[in-house]
Amino acid sequence: MAITDRSGLPVAVWVASASPHEVTLVDETLDACLTLELPERLIGDKGFDSDALDEQLA
């Protein structure tokens, strides 16, 4: 999983096996952030549409 800035430059990268659902990798990916500050907002596809994830990130 990768998080990029608006220019497409990587901000965080996390590699895992193909079996876990992407939504479960968000914490590890944010922990691997390459910048001092976390992103202000995250935009994901429908696979990230989860009330549990929304609460976790709030």
Image (cartoon, rainbow, N blue to C red):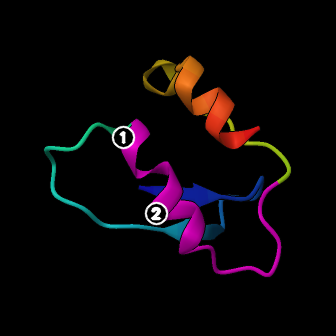
Closer mark to the observer between disc 1 and disc 2: 2
Helix, strand or loop for disc 1:
helix
Helix, strand or loop for disc 2:
helix
Percent position (x, y) of residue 31?
56, 70
In the picture shown, does residue 13 fall above or below 21? below
Q: Residues within 10 Å of mark 1 (few under 14, many from 20)?
A: few
The amino acid sitting under disc 1 is Glu
Dividing the picture into quarters, in which one does residue 53 lie? top right
Magenta stretch: residue 44 in it?
no
Q: Nearer the viewer, residue 47 or 52?
A: 52
Q: Please name the residue shown 28% across and 37% down the image.
A: 21
The amino acid sitting under disc 2 is Glu
Image disc number at residue 30? none
Q: Nearer the viewer, residue 2 or 50?
A: 50
Percent position (x, y) of residue 45?
52, 25
Magenta stretch: residue 33 in it?
yes
In the picture shown, does residue 19 fall above or below 7? above
In the picture shown, does residue 34 fall above or below 14? below
Percent position (x, y) of residue 29?
50, 62
**Image quarter of the N terminus:** bottom left
In the visual, does 32 lie left or right of 7?
Answer: left
Dividing the picture into quarters, in which one does residue 47 lie? top left
Q: Residues within 10 Å of mark 2 (few under 14, many from 20)?
A: some
Distance between mark 1 and mark 2 Cα atoms: 11 Å
* Residue assigned mark 2: 28
Number of labelled discs? 2
Image disc number at residue 22? 1
Dividing the picture into quarters, in which one does residue 54 lie? top right
User: What's the magenta region?
Assistant: 23-39
